[in-house]
Image (cartoon, helix red, strand yellow):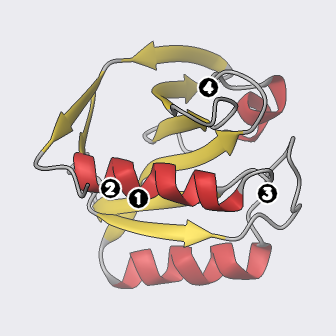
């Protein structure tokens, strides 16, 4: 189960809406071994595409080094789907390289709502998991 603060959820959804029609992406870091997503880091979609995302390699190296310096790891890796449901594509599954991370997808296909779902992706196998929102909403 992913437990995530409503404010962080709201910020992820806002990032997805702001980057629409391109896919948005980023991570939420937390203390190593804690499974607590605490520090959101918006990242640039190097592809600038409505159907694909890729972290910029230089930015990713910088973010991962910063996490190392802070004794953090990527607890959540998120991106948006702009025209389809919030479910990992074959490409998403093939690029999932952090077996301990929660992979969050946000669908912005409906301008009135945002579908927010979380998955574990290990060895190419996708398992949806429940999401529990904690704390107060930023709205």
Q: Secondary structure at mark 1?
A: helix
User: Mark 3 or mark 4, which has the lower sequence index?
Assistant: 3
Instruction: Please name the residue shown 85% across and 45% down the image.
Output: 52
Instruction: Please name the residue shown 87% across and 62% down the image.
Output: 48
**Nearest-to-viewer mark from 3 and 2:** 2
Above or below: residue 137 compared with residue 132: below
User: Mark 4 or mark 2, which has the lower sequence index?
Assistant: 2
Q: Are marks 3 and 1 in contact (CB under 8 Å)?
A: no
> Taking 46 as reference, is 88 left or right?
left
Find the distance from the CA under tag 3 to the CA under tag 4: 17 Å
In the depicted view, which residue is nearer to us: 40 or 109? 109
Find the distance from the CA under tag 3 to the CA under tag 2: 21 Å
Find the distance from the CA under tag 1 to the CA under tag 4: 17 Å
Please name the residue that numbered disc 3 is placed on: 54
> Percent x, y for residue 61?
65, 78
> Taking 54 as reference, is 29 left or right?
left
Label number found at residue 11: 1
**Residue 87 visible in the current orientation:** yes
Furthest-left residue in this view: 135
Above or below: residue 13 compared with residue 109: below
Q: Are marks 4 and 2 in contact (CB under 8 Å)?
A: no
Please name the residue that numbered disc 4 is placed on: 86
Please name the residue that numbered disc 2 is placed on: 8
**Nearest-to-viewer mark from 3 and 1:** 1
> Percent x, y for residue 32?
28, 59
Q: Secondary structure at mark 4?
A: loop
User: Mark 3 or mark 1, which has the lower sequence index?
Assistant: 1
> Percent x, y for residue 5?
22, 48
């Amino acid at each position: 189960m992913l437990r995530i603060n409503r404010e962080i959820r709201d910020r992820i959804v806002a990032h997805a809406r702001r980057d629409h029609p391109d896919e948005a992406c980023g991570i939420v870091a937390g203390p190593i071994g804690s499974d607590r997503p605490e520090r959101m880091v918006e990242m640039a979609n190097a592809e600038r595409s409505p159907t694909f995302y890729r972290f910029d390699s230089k930015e990713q190296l910088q973010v991962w080094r910063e996490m190392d310096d802070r004794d953090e790891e990527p607890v959540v890796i998120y991106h948006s789907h702009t025209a389809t449901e919030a479910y990992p594509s074959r490409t998403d599954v093939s690029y999932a390289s952090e077996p301990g991370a929660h992979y969050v997808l946000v669908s912005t296909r409906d301008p009135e709502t945002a579908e927010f779902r979380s998955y574990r992706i290990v060895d190419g196998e996708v398992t949806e998991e429940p999401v529990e929102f904690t704390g107060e909403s930023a709205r």
